[in-house]
Amino acid sequence: MPKGATAHVTLDLRKLEHFVHVADELNVTRAAQQLHLSQQALSTSIRHLERELGVVLFDRAGRGISLTPAGAALLEVGRPLLAAAEAAVAWSREVGRGEAGRLRVGRTPAVTGEEAHAALHDVQRHHPEASLTVEEVYPAALVRRLTDGDLDLGFARAMGVPAHLETAIVGRHRIRLAVATHHRLAGQEQAGWDELAGEELVVWAPPGVSGYTDVLLSRCREMGIHPRHRVSSLQGTPPVTAVAGSDSVALVTAPRGPAADGRTMVIDLVPGRCVPLQAIWLRHTTSRLRRALLEGLAADPAPQS
């Protein structure tokens, strides 16, 4: 073999699955129980995988085991690879059986249930027999569940994603202002951005940590204002509820009018500015319903009011 060349290795997905279970548990006995294997059989499988790859995946010094740098690298790509393989099997079976298929969607709290439903409307109309589910998922969990193949698609806003996930901007939503009903702006149909000067803006994560917070604050700077901001102490509820009973304001994408059981009011901000609707999915996976959804959204790029 020429100097510097490497032998071709065919990765056995079953051995990879064994490795991922052991890496998750860092305990061969528990992993073997989950896989319904003997501890000896699982240990042998891991040893064979290490020999095939030519690297040590686990540090076995001491009483426990831990991942080596090579093991950590394999785990990072191994999860999405297993999920992609499972998705390929599911896709093939759906096509072969003539099934309508399913689409499991996760949305971060920054994307409302109504916005997710609107994005799915055409798919639901054209594929009425398909199974479509949507659930709210926090960003870190969204990445994990897309990676593990538990979700087929994610909706978010300006979220950073690891390299094994694909992402695209598939829409835009207009920014509006949410205030409590006692707020000085609550009786207006619209407000100018300059009227936010001096107001306290509620956000849901610190700037620099949340891409969506960064986008909202950048929209303010584009309009020449630099409002004070605080992170909401109430997480997991619709954004329009964050200002109820307070003197703060929030930038939201909810429709105009009363919200939060009449405790808040949503008004237009002029001139209009938008925030992106982001789709995220696992690379190297195929979904007929996801493709139809993304193609439909790409064909209608107009901002949603």
Image (cartoon, grey):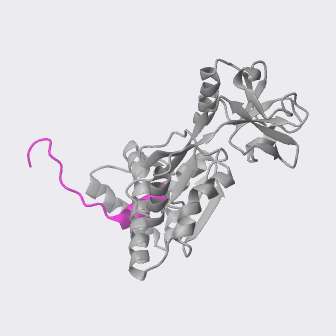
In the image, is residue 117 above or below residue 92? above
Q: Quadrant of residue 264?
A: top right
Q: Inspect the magenta stretch and tell me whether residue 18 lies in it.
A: yes
Coordinates of residue 2 in the picture (x, y in percent): 8, 45
Q: Nearer the viewer, residue 229 or 198?
A: 198
In the image, is residue 211 above or below residue 80? above
Q: Nearer the viewer, residue 107 or 264?
A: 264
Coordinates of residue 156 in the picture (x, y in percent): 58, 46
In the image, is residue 17 above or below residue 190? below
Identified at 55% across, 53% down, the residue is: 154
Q: Residue furthest left?
A: 2
Quadrant in which the C terminus appears: top right
Q: Which residues are magenta?
A: 1-24
Q: Residue furthest front?
A: 189
Residue 305 shows up from this direction:
yes
Q: Inspect the magenta stretch and tell me whether residue 105 lies in it.
A: no
Q: Nearer the viewer, residue 289 or 46?
A: 289
Residue 44 shows up from this direction:
no
Left or right for 257, reference 94:
right
Number of marks present in the image shown: 0
Coordinates of residue 161 in the picture (x, y in percent): 49, 43
Left or right for 108, reference 28:
right
Coordinates of residue 183 in the picture (x, y in percent): 87, 30
